[in-house]
Amino acid sequence: MLSIIIPVLNEAGTIEKTLVHLCANCLNKKHTEIIVVDGGSTDKTHSLVNGFAHRRTELSLTVHHSERGRAKQMNAGAAVAKGSILYFLHADSLPPKGFDEMIRKEVEQGKKAGCFRMKFDNSHLLLRISQWFTMFNFKACRGGDQSLFLTVDIFNSLGGFNEDFEIYEDCEFIGRIYDRYKFTIIKDYVVTSARRYNTNGTWRLQYHFAMIHLLKWTGASPTKLLRYYLRHIS
């Protein structure tokens, strides 16, 4: 079984669209489950997901709760997952048609960890340049918006996501995968929202993301990364 794990926090504006998309583009619904992990939403996220689960029964969908923080939420989702393959997906990212079978095929071929290439839903030049780099299989080209699949065995061997990281948790975890295992890039695309760029300004946000990467590469602690993020990014 493939377990899709989606951490959410106040995603009422996006989560239903994502769930509709997953149902429409999952080919093997019988062997796929969706686990939404809520980190304490105060909007209608929880009721929207529950309502969707009652209306659309062709694909298993459950809602779980955990402490706030994507690393904690994704670990909580993995803890209740029934599948042998975990697929971590952001609430505003939409995988391609047949994504579930693409992932299964990679795992069957021995490629036990990887992601898709990524496109933004915005044609800004800087974003087009940024998304172009997702075709390359280098640690520095990875990010959570590209989604992430891996087997449960690999997830457990790495101890899951490092919950000390309230930001940068995806990159930190993927970095550890690269250090110990082979990583593959599926040639099709996840389409992800550029909403943070729209809110913060594209050039400004890209600069601050680059600074966060630089801080991490020079040994900054999770606390220092979070402090920088909260100071500069909405």
Image: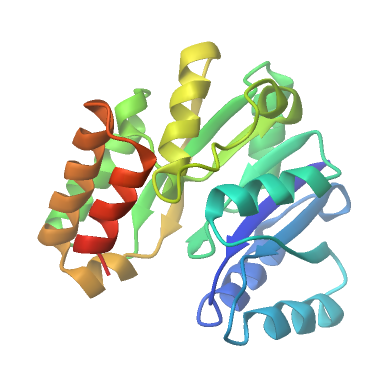
Position of the C terminus by quadrant: bottom left
Direction from residue 125 to residue 76 in the image, left or right:
right
Q: Determine whether, in the image, residue 222 is placed left or right of residue 14.
A: left
Q: Image check: 121 left or right of 21?
A: left
Scheme of image coloration = rainbow
Is 211 or 184 nearer to us in this picture?
A: 211
- Residue 149 occupies quadrant: top right
The mark total stands at 0
**Identity of the residue drawn at 48% across and 65% down:** 92
Q: Quadrant of residue 34?
A: bottom right
Q: State left or right for residue 148 relative to residue 55.
A: left
Q: Is there any visible trace of residue 95 in the rendered image?
A: no
Measuring from the top left, give residue 232's x and y in whole percent: 19, 62
Q: Position of residue 192 (x, y in %)?
A: 41, 59
Residue sitting nearer the eye, 130 or 206: 206
Q: Residue at x 31, y 32 (%)?
A: 141
Quadrant of the drawing holding the N terminus: top right
In front of the other: 64 or 116: 64
Q: Please name the residue shown 26% across and 40% down the image.
A: 132
Q: Position of residue 15 (x, y in %)?
A: 59, 73
**In the image, residue 60 lies at what x, y percent?**
85, 61
Residue in the picture at 67% in, 29% down: 155
